[in-house]
Structures are given as structure tokens and as C-alpha cells.
Image (cartoon, coloured by chain):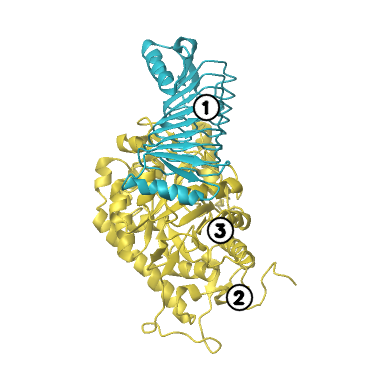
Chain colours: A yellow, B cyan
Amino acid sequence: MSEKHTPVLRESATFDRLTIQEIQRAAETGIYDIRGGGTKRKLPHFDDLLLLGASVSRYPLEGYREKCGTDVILGNRFAKKPIHLKIPVTIAGMSFGALSANAKEALGRGATIAGTSTTTGDGGMTPEERGQSQHLVYQYLPSRYGMNPDDLRKADAIEIVLGQGAKPGGGGMLLGMKVTERVAGMRTLPIGVDQRSACRHPDWTGPDDLAIKIAELREITDWEKPIYVKIGASRPYYDVKLAVKAGADVIVLDGMQGGTAATQEVFIEHVGIPILPAIPQAVQALQEMGMHRKVQLIVSGGIRNGADVAKAMALGADAVAIGTAALIALGDNHPRLDEELKQIGSAAGYYDDWQNGRDPAGITTQDPELSKRLDPVEGGRRLANYLRVLVLEAQTMARACGKSHLHNLDPEDLVALTVESAAMARVPLAGTSWIPGSGY
Amino acid sequence: MKTIDLSTASVRDLNQALHDQVNQVEDREWVVTHSNGKHNLAVGVNQAVSIDIQGHAGYYCAGMNQKASITVHGNAGVGVAENMMSGMVRIKGSASQAAGATAHGGLLVIEGDAGARCGISMKGIDIVVGGSIGHMSCFMGQAGRLVVCGDAGDALGDSLYETRIYVKGSVQSLGSDCVEKEMRAEHLEELQELLNRAGFDESPASFKRYGSARQLYNFKVDNASAY
């Protein structure tokens, strides 16, 4: 008598269900997949690092009593008016167009309450965000959509965007459904076109030209504004050196976990490097030039909590920037939207079709009815709460490491859990003194 | 008339003095001597003043100009009148690449030739070139008019939006989605007006008009080979 055998289905590691689905989708549509957000793959990240709290060999600070400073000054290399922020967590550049006007206003409100800066994006500056942002960084992008000298003068700093972590080397896109009358008008485009943004600046090509471009922007603004240079992490050691040589006041370094409003999935997942190995390369470049802490380093790409903030700063960053996390704080992917998200083929916690403008949270949309769902005052309050938590968490860990300011965290406060992260972050593997790649 | 001698004054001195005119105009006419190809001359000017640069200019001369009338009595480097908003810039000689890049308004006249990418991403400026222009000119041109009295290089008007292009001479090749279009009466009229403002006596009837076929405005997989 034979026993009934229940076969175990074996999924291919190479052709897993997601891969099969993508091949089927490509065969059906003939076009690559476009989505928003950052990489979804598992990468070496801050979770692979641990902070070493104080004990006998180090002296901790009292958790709720002793001061742990959080402020940061950005842009004091050349600018007459550097920015002084209360906290080292800034809001990354995101455009009106990609985001609703209410979302941009909410970001400004939240950042201002918390004492930090927010940043424009492709398409120019809106009165809503300027009005609600105490510190507003004006992005200077290859497309120059909406770029004008009046807004340049209104800005508190200028960020020359050379790339972003989600797509180093790639230009932007804003699909036609989000190019409404207002968005099109600000960008001098026909309503409803699939807007393409250039990947290179139109009037300069290399680092020597960049130096002249930076000088031009300084001249136009009478040397008042700090000038940031934003780099998508791919070759940060060389890129940082060239940007500093060209005259940058601040480097913004965005790892591949950083989000995008709309980019090809294959680009998001396969171009650039994570923020973890990017930071030590950038810090090395700054140190070799004698510019660490003189040219400030803002890092972004996958910052989620105070531990990430503390670890990024321990690796040598002066501040961090958040984008995706800020949108989540406003209400993106909230569980209450699950049913509506399912109706458009997604679910709470998974939604990444930011390009199609149907966001039920009213954030990544230009639909007037959907946009109304986001109350900018309430959104700002939620963002400010989240920013406070990030800072409180980072302070908690810094005090435990005996640091009276977040800037006093350093690589000696860190160990790595894996050989890979030890090599990338250039800190010892936990329990050893071994930093892979640092010699014999 | 105010004279700034760049053999003794710095570019910073020049630009600051020009910016100071925003609140109160002290001099309507400015002369800049010994420019010697210096970069960033007369950038960010925001007042209806007249500026004569008596020599060659380097990169970004007249960048982001608003209202001023600026003349370069020589050649101009990369990105002359980049992102100009209004006013007029005249180059008596030739201009390097990216002349008038991303500019939103005003009139740029180049009496000689212009290099590659003339009018790249232009957003409303009018550009009139007495001579020829280089390759990839008017790439992603969004609005405004580009007039070329000589020849145009390779890939003219690639990925064009709504800029109208008029060329008298030959066009080496047209970029993706750029096509020759019918020259109607209203086009002859606007071209005549542009030539008059630029001070050129060419006949509008000798030009051809080019514009966007608008086939790439929304992505269609059938057009993939055009990208």
C-alpha cells in the first residue's frame, strides 16, 4: 500500500515569483516598470552597526539631565549668511509636482516647528513652501524648471543638484497625469506632457566649469547664500573632492536607498551604492583636504530613526536629510488607506506608484480632491513630532556614549555586525579590532 | 556714465555695484573696460541700465539678466545670458556653447556664430544669431523663438517642446521629434519683427521654420527607437 505523497513546491532562487511577474509584465506591455520610492532590496545599512555605550572605559552622560547639543551650522565656508539649524535632521528636496502643494506646505510647517530646513525640488519654489519654511534650500537642477533669480534671492541656501541616490546619472520624470495646469505653468510646459528632466546641467560639463557656475551663483546672490552640492552616491570619494575643490560650502550625499518621485525600477535597484559605504569615502575625501567639519556633509538615503541619525553622524556626517520617512510621517502608506490602496493594486505598507498621481493620502498627487485630504497644519504637526523623536532618540544614544553634542559621536563609538558592513563603514567587526581592508 | 575698469576693480566690485542699482539708480549707463574674458560679468542684474562690456567676456556673462541692456564688444564664453528673464543682450562677436541656456525671456542677439547647444532648454527667450549655430541647439527647447541667419549643426531641436526655430541656411540634421513646418503669414510677421529688433536685414521669406512634431510628448512604446 502506497502512502499519499504531498509534493513540496520549490521556488527558483533565480526565477522567483517577482522575477517571473516582471518578465510577464514586460512581455505584455513592452515598457519598463516605473515607480517611486527607493530601493527595496536588502542592503548593508545602519542596522548592521551598533553603538558602544559607555561603561568603565567611557563616561556616560545622564540621560534626562545633562545637555546633549543638536544644533548645526551649514555653509560657513564662504557664505555671509550660513544657516543655523536647531537639529541636524533636514528635509530633502522634493518637488511641487511630485508632491501636492499641501504636502509641500506641511513639510515646511513641520520643519519650521522643529527648527530645521526644507528643500524645493524640480519645478521651482511655491509661495506655500516659502511662506511656511523658516529655512528653505532652493534646488538648482539640470532642467531649471521654474528657476528664476527672484526665487534664488528669496532662498536661504542653494543646492546644486548633480544627482540623487535613487538614480545617479539619470534625469527626472513627471508623468503627464501630474503635469496639471499649475505644474505645467511653473515649468513652462504643455499641460499633460510626460515631462523629462535632463540628467546633465545645460551650461557646464565638468568640475572646472562647476567652479565657475558656483562663482556665478555666489555673484548673483552677493555671496550671501550657502551653496550645497548634491551628489548621488556612486563614486563619493572623487565626487566630494571635486565638489569641494569647485567651492561647495556643503556636500549633500544621497545613497541608493533615497527615494524618487518616478524612475525606472531597474534603475532604482541597480545603480549607485548604499549610504553606508558612501559616508566613509566622503569623510576620507574631506579629511584629506582638511575640510571635514569646514565643508559640512549632509547624508541621506534610508534614515528612519534616531539610531540611523546617530550612526550616520558617528561616521562623520554633520547632518542627515530625510525624504521617504518624512512622507510616511505625513501619512503616506497609512493603514487607514489600505482598502483604497487595494483598489489601485497596492496595499498599505507597499504603495510605491507615486508617479501616477492617485495617492489616497493626498501627498504624491496633483488631483485637487485627493490633495485636500492632507491638512498641511496637521501634517506639519505630525512631521514635527517625528523629527523630535528622531532627535530625542539620537540624543539618548549619544549621551550613552558620553557625548555632549551629536557632533561628538565618532567612528570609535561604532562596531559592525557583519564583515561586509565592517568593511564598508570602516569600523571594527564587533568583538574584534578587525576592520576589513584597513591593513594586516 | 559710470566706468568700471576691471584691471583695477574686481568682478565682485562690478556685480555689487550693478546690484546696488536695484534700490536706487545712480547711473543708467555703465562701461566695463579690460574685461579680458573674465567670467560672470554683469550677472544677476535687476535694473533697466545699459552696460557696455568693451572686450571679450568669459562664462555666464549677463547670466539671469533682468531688465538690463548688455552689449559685449567682443566674443562671449559658455552660457552667455543663461536663464535670462528679460532685457537684451547683444554679442558683437561670436558666442561659445549654451548661449541663452534655459532663459525665460528677453532678447539675445549674437552677431557672429554660436557654438553647440545654443538655446538649450530655452523657456521663452528670443535668440537671433547672425551666423551659424553648433550641434544639439535648442535641445528640449520649451518656449520662445530661435532665429539663425546661417546654418544649423547636427540634431537641431532634439526633443523639442514649443520653441519655434527659423533657419535661413542648411540644417545638418534634425533631432528627434523636430520637423520642418509650414511658414505661414503669422510666422513671416513674427520673424520680420525679430530680425528688425536684432538689426538684421535678412528677408523672412528666405527662412524655413522648424518645430515639434509633438509625437514624443507622451511616452509610447512604438517611439522607443526615437529616444
In the displayed structure, would residue A384 be above or below residue A189? below
In the displayed structure, would residue B167 be above or below residue A17? above
Q: Are marks 3 and 2 on the same chain?
A: yes
* Crowd band around label 3 with a 10 angstrom C-alpha radius: few (<14), some (14–19), many (20+): some
Residue A287 placement (x, y as % from top left):
61, 67
Mark 1 or 3: the one toward you? 1
The residue type indicated by label 3 comes to Leu
Near-viewer residue (A256 or B5): B5
Mark 1 or 2: the one toward you? 1
Q: Are marks 1 and 3 on the same chain?
A: no
The residue type indicated by label 2 comes to Ala
Chain of the residue on which disc 3 is drawn: A
Residue at which label 3 appears: A43
Q: CA distance from mark 3 to mark 2?
A: 19 Å
Can residue A352 be seen in the rendering of this structure?
A: no
* Crowd band around label 2 with a 10 angstrom C-alpha radius: few (<14), some (14–19), many (20+): some
Q: Is residue A117 left or right of residue A314?
A: left
Q: Which mark is residue B191?
A: none
- The residue tagged with tag 2: helix, strand or loop? loop
Q: Are marks 1 and 2 on the same chain?
A: no
Q: Is residue A153 left or right of residue B139?
A: left
- The residue tagged with tag 1: helix, strand or loop? loop
Residue at which label 1 appears: B158
Residue A434 placement (x, y as % from top left):
67, 74
Q: Which mark is residue A430?
A: 2
In the displayed structure, would residue A328 be above or below residue B170? below
The residue type indicated by label 1 comes to Asp
Chain of the residue on which disc 1 is drawn: B
The total of numbered circles placed on residues is 3
Residue B156 placement (x, y as % from top left):
54, 24
